[in-house]
Image (cartoon, rainbow, N blue to C red):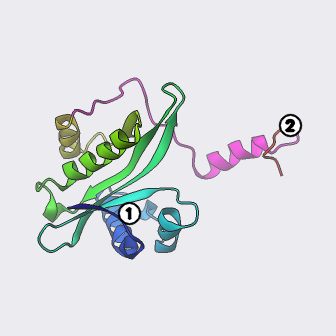
Amino acid sequence: MIRAATPADVPVLHALIRELADYEKALSEARATEEQLREALFGPDPLAHALVAADGTSGEPVGFALWFRTYSTWTGTPGLYLEDLFVRPQARGAGHGKALLAALAAICVERGWSRFEWAVLDWNEKALAVYRAVGARPQDEWTVQRLTGPALAALAAQAASPANPANPYAN
């Protein structure tokens, strides 16, 4: 059973996110709070959306998908970016992950969006097998780039520097 997340799901979504981070060997990096998640999903200007996979018998949440809208300058249409998908280990193999992917694909098709994209760790062979089985293909020529911490601050400081007075974002 797949359904849209509600504000009442925030505690379980937060727990699932932490379980995902632990699975990915990065629990110390999962610093988001329940309050931040609630604001991001259900605040006045939602930044993301979530689906919940629930056990068909008990209705207990066993997984989730968190996504947000993107835009392609090449196609001129929105797309969907899947930030996280996780199914608890004891619930894997029952089709929850594939059902979450299908629900997200349906969102794209129903809304006329042209792309559904996500990143996956290269060592996650089970997830890669599921993604290949539904027809996803890697974008081999592209790599993910990320700026965080001091590198992000250093680059931002260049935009706000006196050497760039035309910057509309400078304070």
Q: Is residue 56 above or below residue 102?
A: below
Would you say residue 121 is visible in this rendering? yes
Name the amino acid, label 2: Ala
In the rendered image, residue 58, in percent from the top left (x then y), is placed at: 15, 74
Mark 2 or mark 1: name the one nearer the start of the chain: 1
Residue beneath disc 2: 166
Judge the density around disc 2: few (<14), some (14-19), many (≥20) Cα neighbours within 10 Å. Answer: few
Residue range in magenta is 135-162
Q: Is the C-beta separation of discs 2 and 1 under 8 Å?
A: no
Name which residue lies at 28% across and 50% down.
103
Residue nearest the viewer, comparing 22 with 9: 9
In the rendered image, residue 122, in percent from the top left (x then y), is placed at: 29, 39
Q: Give SS at disc 1.
A: helix
Name which residue lies at 77% across and 41% down.
159
- Does the magenta portion include 149? yes
- Asked if residue 116 lies left or right of residue 160, the reply is left
Q: Quadrant of residue 90?
A: bottom left
Q: From the image, which quarter does the N terminus lie in? A: bottom left
Name which residue lies at 49% across and 41% down.
70
In the rendered image, residue 111, in percent from the top left (x then y), is placed at: 40, 42
Mark 2–mark 1 Cα distance, whole angstroms, equals 41 Å
- Does the magenta portion include 75? no
For the stretch drawn in magenta, the main secondary structure is: loop
Residue nearest the viewer, comparing 135 with 154: 135
Identify the disc placed on residue 27.
1
Q: Give SS at disc 2.
A: loop
Judge the density around disc 1: few (<14), some (14-19), many (≥20) Cα neighbours within 10 Å. Answer: some
- Asked if residue 71 lies left or right of residue 1, the reply is right
Name the amino acid, label 1: Leu
Between label 2 and label 1, give the one nearer the viewer.
2
- Asked if residue 67 lies left or right of residue 87, the reply is right
Would you say residue 119 is visible in this rendering? no
